[in-house]
Image (cartoon, helix red, strand yellow):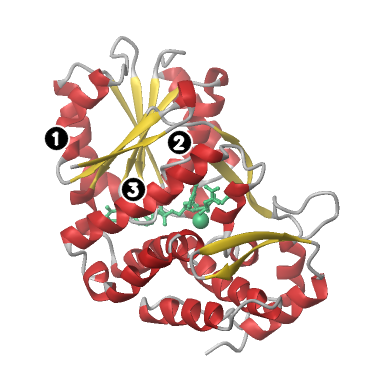
């Protein structure tokens, strides 16, 4: 078992990573002051419910918790205001109060949604992240919680940190292959933006990571979470540094929105976005290897690098203007100065970005 800490003063919290953590959920909850006096709500999706919910609920009931379960349909479409409203209705009916805790059991969709329920229910209650995807090494840490609007991704949300992150790596064994690859996309991102050594290790360990080798996976998740917690501890509310975690997301989020949130997985969309941002970095004068190595990493991990032909470039450009990094009329992009060294650059020409997006249509 590995442990990390996100250092945010009185909002600090631990991340526990290891096999079989869910079996000790009662003692983790007791240690971190999760009250058993009011009902707690476990939010999950229908895939995860059929695989992992019973174990969680059983251990919580055995530890004296009153558990309310809420199961949403799997997929990005559940990150919506209407699903949020239904969950809050159930929370009220089930007697949750201000001392109740919301548990997110699932991937980033459930984490972002349940986290936003916790941020908004009665103006904020505690929540716990129990990530069950590789991608969620990113989403369960840092407190960005949100739902989508048809026009823009994650545009209705808050910063609301969890009390604990309980990462039980045994849950990852049931992940479908496509989700494994998509999850590793954010791990590749963490290497590219922060740590050239880690990036090299990811390159050398593709086979192990893709086949869920336990030791490699734990090491990769630990390092990914470490990079994320370091950045978040420095800049919780994205006044500056935190925007580096958005590498690949300016184009990626626009692709997700234009594809109606049901064609590209988040990890896939940002893989294409990272190739675009790497191309842009080179066009701005940084070394060619940024593009060649980023693209090679995506290919090695079986991730897409090309914008699907049916997505309209004008629509993508329009959606991109909703990027939360664009402020006061300035186009801001996270680029790389080199592998392992991200940089936030303002004032990039929109024509240049369009050129890059058009080229991504033909990437091979
Ligand atoms: N808040 C953040 O900082 C942050 C960071 C990165 C991504 N995100 C968000 O996370 C979301 C993507 O997360 P995701 O890729 O985990 O998607 P997801 O939550 O949709 O999970 C992916 C799929 O895997 C299934 N699944 C989950 N765990 C499983 C398991 N153990 N076994 C079998 N199937 C399982 C789910 O049912 C779903 O179908 C996006 O909405 C993205 O915007 C947020
Ligand atoms: O935590 C962050 O900050 C990130 O940028 C992590 C991203 O992987 C994640 O997808 C996040 O939700 C994107 O942030 P957003 O503010 O652009 O919605
Ligand atoms: Zn992301």
**Compared to 227, does 278 lie above or below?**
below
Give the position of the N terminus as an image quadrant.
top left
Q: Is the CB–ligand 1 distance for label 1 below 8 Å?
A: no
Residue highlighted by disc 1: 23
- Tell me, yes or no, if residue 263 can be seen here: no
Query: What's the mark number on residue 67?
Result: none
Q: Nearer the viewer, residue 154 or 343?
A: 343
Q: Residue 279's x, y, as percent? A: 62, 79
At numbered mark 1, what does the secondary structure look like: helix, strand or loop?
helix
In this rendering, position of residue 316 left or right of residue 177: right
How far apart in space, not on screen, are marks 1 and 2 (Cα)?
22 Å
Q: Nearer the viewer, residue 76 or 205?
A: 205
At numbered mark 3, what does the secondary structure look like: helix, strand or loop?
helix
How many numbered circles are shown?
3
Query: What's the mark number on residue 46?
Result: 3
In this rendering, position of residue 218 left or right of residue 190: left
Q: Is the CB–ligand 1 distance for label 3 below 8 Å?
A: yes
Q: Dot 3, how many residues are within 10 Å of its Cα: few (below 14), some (14-19), or many (20+)?
A: some
Residue in the image at 42% along x and 77% along y:
297
Residue in the image at 56% along x and 26% along y:
120
Q: In which image quadrant can residue 146 be found?
A: top right
**Compared to 2, does 186 lie above or below?**
below
**Compared to 158, does 173 lie above or below?**
below
Mark 2 or mark 3: name the one nearer the start of the chain. 3
At numbered mark 2, what does the secondary structure look like: helix, strand or loop?
helix
Residue in the image at 47% along x and 63% along y:
189
Q: Residue 134's x, y, as percent? A: 33, 56
Q: Which of marks 1 and 3 is in front?
A: 1
Query: What's the mark number on residue 114?
Result: 2
Mark 1 or mark 3: name the one nearer the start of the chain. 1
């Amino acid at each position: 078992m590995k442990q990390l800490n996100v250092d945010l003063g009185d909002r600090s919290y631990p991340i526990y990573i290891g096999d079989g953590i869910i079996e000790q959920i009662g003692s983790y909850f007791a240690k971190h002051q999760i009250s058993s006096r009011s009902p707690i709500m476990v939010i999950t999706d229908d895939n995860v419910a059929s695989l992992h919910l019973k174990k969680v609920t059983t251990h919580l009931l055995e530890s004296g918790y009153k558990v309310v379960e809420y199961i949403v349909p799997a997929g990005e479409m559940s990150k919506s205001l209407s699903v949020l409203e239904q969950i809050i209705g159930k929370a009220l009916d089930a007697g949750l109060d201000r001392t109740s805790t919301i548990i997110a059991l699932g991937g980033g969709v459930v984490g972002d949604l349940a986290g936003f329920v916790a941020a908004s229910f009665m103006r904020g209650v505690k929540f716990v992240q129990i990530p069950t995807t590789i991608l969620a090494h990113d989403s369960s840490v840092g407190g960005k919680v949100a739902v989508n609007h048809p026009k823009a991704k994650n545009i209705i949300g808050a910063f609301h940190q969890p009390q604990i992150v309980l990462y039980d790596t045994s849950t990852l064994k049931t992940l479908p292959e496509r989700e494994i690859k998509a999850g590793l996309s954010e791990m590749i991102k963490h290497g590219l933006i922060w740590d050239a050594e880690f990036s090299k290790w990811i390159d050398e360990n593709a086979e192990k990571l893709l086949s869920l080798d336990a030791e490699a996976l734990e090491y990769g998740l630990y390092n990914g979470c470490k990079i994320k917690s370091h950045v978040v501890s420095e800049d919780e509310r994205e006044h500056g540094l935190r925007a580096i975690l958005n590498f690949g997301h300016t184009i990626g989020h626009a692709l997700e929105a234009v594809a109606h949130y049901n064609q590209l997985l988040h990890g896939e969309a940002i893989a294409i976005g990272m190739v675009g941002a790497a191309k842009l970095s080179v066009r701005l004068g940084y070394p060619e290897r940024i593009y060649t190595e980023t693209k090679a990493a995506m290919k090695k991990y079986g991730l897409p690098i090309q914008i699907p032909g049916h997505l309209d470039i004008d629509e993508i450009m329009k959606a991109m203007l909703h990027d939360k990094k664009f402020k006061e009329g300035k186009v801001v992009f996270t680029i790389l100065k080199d592998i392992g060294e991200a940089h936030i650059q303002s004032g990039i020409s929109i024509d240049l970005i369009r050129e890059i997006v058009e080229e991504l249509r033909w990437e091979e």
